[in-house]
Image: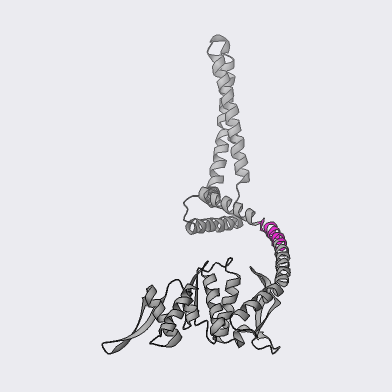
């Protein structure tokens, strides 16, 4: 911008320049009594006397050098004079560029042209970097396609593994369902292709038939609360060693069963409790007897209001409560003996 400003000043003072340049050239060389001609006359006078004083030869050399230097100055002044011309169009261009420069200085909060040039170099570097984006995008697309192909292969392997495990899973589940009082229940695992996710490309559905009707429907639609609880108990007991859930809660899981089926529910809960914390709400003595710790939930009338409380039972209290489950609020000696036997077993 400094160079443009100088050029604009020159354009605005063209007449002064040409007038003074011409006058200077005339004084040096082109006028009747120009300096160069006068120096040449002085040199000629002194040359005839140089033999009479040993200082004159050196002065003559200096005069000669002065004439050469002044001649060069005169020539350059004439060249400048010839090149300086008033150009209105050029003035407009310079003014527009200067205005743009001042706006850029204000916009970027800079003070000098050097700072703007440094900014331009920085932006140019960033622009060159973005020029490689197409190549980077192409590489990323290729990598994405490669990973997608690999993921689909892994998903296909996972699907084959699931297909292979479907029948063994159902067979083992049928055995457990029979133990917990659901001898007529039938299960089926259905795999359908879905969206590709972190768990593969299968949508896994458990279908349930409670009474050998041959009509399988999704478990969530046809299983009762008790059936669903027992089904989950069976499945959890099958995967107990690989599941990561620390605590399992079952609410009246033995609903609708008694006798040996209820005892089998208690046994499964006990087995599950070796690797998980199991909390079970139960009204069945066969289930309650399998617990390691027994809490009694009860209601009490306090100040005219009914409050629900809970407390841990001691060993003798457990026998009394389980016996009450067997024979009522006033358990018999036989019921107490039966309760003790259930706990020992």
The quadrant in which residue 196 appears is: bottom right
Residue 142 magenta-drawn?
yes
Q: Is residue 280 visible?
A: no
Task: Give the image location of residue 337, x and y in percent.
Answer: 44, 79
Q: Is residue 60 magenta?
A: no
Look at the image and name its color scheme. Answer: one colour
Nearest the viewer among 163 and 76 is: 163
> 76 and 266: which one is in front?
266
Front-lying residue, 154 or 218: 218
By secondary structure, the bulk of the magenta-drawn segment is best described as: helix
Q: Which residues are magenta?
A: 131-146
Q: Residue at x 60, y 47 (%)?
A: 84
From this viewpoint, is residue 147 visible?
yes
Displayed quadrant of residue 152: bottom right
Q: In x, y percent, where is residue 176?
A: 62, 77
Residue furthest to the left:
303
Q: Residue at x 58, y 29 (%)?
A: 69
Residue ID at (68%, 86%): 216
Q: Is residue 213 above or below residue 61?
A: below
In the rendering, at what x and y percent does residue 65 appear? 58, 24
User: 84 or 318, which lies in front?
Assistant: 318
> Residue at left 60%, top 69%?
239
Residue 222 position by quadrant: bottom right
């Amino acid at each position: 911008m400094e160079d443009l400003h100088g050029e604009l000043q020159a354009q605005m003072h063209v007449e002064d320049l040409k007038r003074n340049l011409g006058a200077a050239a005339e004084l040096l060389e082109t006028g009747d009594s120009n300096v160069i001609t006068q120096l040449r006359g002085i040199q000629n006078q002194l040359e005839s006397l140089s033999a009479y004083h040993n200082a004159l030869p050196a002065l003559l050399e200096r005069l000669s050098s002065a004439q050469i230097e002044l001649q060069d100055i005169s020539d350059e002044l004439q060249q400048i004079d010839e090149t300086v011309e008033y150009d209105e169009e050029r003035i407009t261009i310079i003014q527009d560029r200067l205005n743009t420069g001042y706006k850029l200085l204000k916009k970027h909060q800079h003070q000098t042209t050097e700072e703007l040039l440094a900014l331009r170099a920085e932006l140019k570097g960033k622009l060159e970097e973005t020029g490689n984006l197409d190549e980077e995008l192409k590489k990323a697309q290729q990598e994405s396609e490669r990973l997608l192909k690999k993921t689909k292969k892994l998903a296909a392997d996972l699907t084959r593994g699931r297909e292979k495990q479907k029948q063994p899973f159902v067979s083992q589940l049928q055995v457990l369902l029979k133990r917990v009082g659901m001898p007529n229940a039938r299960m089926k695992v259905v795999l359908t292709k879905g969206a590709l996710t972190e768990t593969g490309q299968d949508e896994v559905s458990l279908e349930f038939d409670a009474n050998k009707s041959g009509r399988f429907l999704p478990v969530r639609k046809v299983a009762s609360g008790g059936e669903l609880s027992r089904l989950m108990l069976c499945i959890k007991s099958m995967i107990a060693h690989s599941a990561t859930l620390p605590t399992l809660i079952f609410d009246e899981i033995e609903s609708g069963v008694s006798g040996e089926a209820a005892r089998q529910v208690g046994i499964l809960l006990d087995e599950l409790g070796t690797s998980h914390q199991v909390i079970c709400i139960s009204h069945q003595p066969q289930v309650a007897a399998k617990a390691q710790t027994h809490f009694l939930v009860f209601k009490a009338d306090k100040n005219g209001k009914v409050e629900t409380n809970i407390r841990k039972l001691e060993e003798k209290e457990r026998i009394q409560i389980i016996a009450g489950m067997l024979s009522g609020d006033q358990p018999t000696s036989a019921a107490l003996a039966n309760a003790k036997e259930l706990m020992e077993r």
